[in-house]
Image: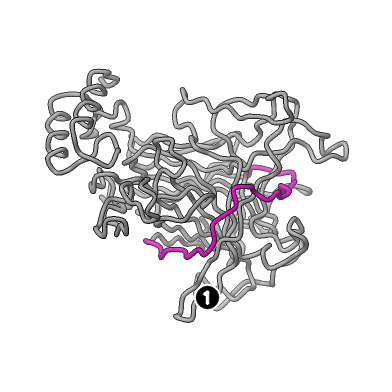
Amino acid sequence: MKAKSALTVAMAAGIASTAAASNTPTTLAPTQAQVQNIAHIYYNVASGERVVTVLAGSQTAPADTGASVPIWSALVQNPCTAQGYTTSYYFGVDDPTNTSMGGATALATNVTNLDMGDIALDTVVDCVQVNWVVSHPDTDTDSDSIGDGVEELAGQWIVWDADNGRVTNQSTRLPLVDFLFFNLPGNVAAAGFLSGYTLDVDLVAGFTGTDLSFEMGDSDGDCQSAAFCNSSVFDSATSTFLPIAQCDNDFDSLADSDLDGDGLFDFSWTVRFYQPGTGNDFDSDSDTGSAAPSASDSIGISFGFPEGSASDNGDGTWTWNVDTSVEAPGTGVEDGFAIYNPPVPDGMGGEIITHNGFYWFGGFACEGVPISEGGTGYAPAAMFQFVLYGPGSGTCSPADVNGDGQLNFFDVSQFIQDYNAGGDYNGDGATNFFDVSQFIQDYNAGGCP
């Protein structure tokens, strides 16, 4: 980021919610714009290293460990290219001119946008990619091809354990990591375009030994190789502390972390933007921004899709077929997302953020009159660009439990040690013969050097 910019990483306080979302989402209009991808920024929060790459197509970067790989990814921004569409969409999360909900109401600004997906239990994350699309005018005085930074324009991203967007119930949801970036680079694109940026937030500095990595979906109380995880969570159903993947706080005899019942761990991520001129002084320089939000001050996020293809179901609906054979498919991505209301004081010095509703863009479809011809173009699915990276070693087989990239006696020894400590290898909430059977099956299947 720019010299004035900064980042905070912390365990976040929980967001309070008071109402479950309806199973039927409310339709919103996607934000339409010509977006010019400006740059990819690599930022290591552990070491302070910053590298900017001017984009010449989609680019990603792993963590600074030498072995990090994508483990969950939604990157393809235009799913309907094969049908001849070239329109770019983004969703204006914080847009003072947003009229999609009946006018420029308070819900158009200072809201929290939540998107969700599924991932394997006990997944270690050492790098997270986020993005923003921005119309705030900016300068480039140092000629590095990205904006100098808009005073007090900020974005806050949080990754959450055990959450599927609150479509059907409320349960455990706990934060894992909280990123706050301020003085974000703004719009330096050509006239008529908005600027798009991607940012890899690296959590590990190998040369210093600093580690802020986290484990998602802890099932056995062991954070694996990660620095932290939700390994001891109070479970109301049993009145004991359990790994988060075993909790049942809504008393329905089902794990709160698999509300859709697909065998994978439910997670979510949220983003909330802060406009300049609204009283925030994140960099403590007594300047809260040049002006209050205006008609030109939209900031949002790009649409993303896992690898796959679009197919016409023949009944007016379309399906995005995820290609699970590729590395890091964005599994569990849904055609819907949640919005949370602007925060209000809780009377105790904190804030309360309440659930507003579940939304979509009318049902994904690669058909419609192009915007260039006066239409609205295709209907994008409510999937947003997001990438998680994890250690490359240990991904060759689930049976590589010690994470050294090989299957051998040391994995058997580690499995026995974990099993004797109550480890739940197959993620069913119990330690028994089925864990042994699944480990033997995975071990015999090989897949490692």
Q: Magenta segment range?
A: 11-37
Inspect the magenta stretch and tell me whether residue 5 lies in it.
Answer: no
Identify whether 244 is placed above or below 371: below
Inspect the magenta stretch and tell me whether residue 12 lies in it.
Answer: yes
* Residue 86 relative to residue 181: left or right: right
Where does the C terminus fall, quadrant-wise?
top left
Rendered location of residue 274, percent (x, y): 59, 65
Rendered location of residue 173, percent (x, y): 42, 55
Identify whether 216 is placed above or below 100: above
Outermost residue on the front side: it is 252
Q: Main secondary structure of the magenta part?
A: loop
Q: Quadrant of residue 414?
A: top left
Rendered location of residue 52, percent (x, y): 52, 46
Disc 1 target residue: 285
Identify whether 331 is placed above or below 352: above
* Residue 250 relative to residue 117: left or right: left
Outermost residue on the right side: it is 374
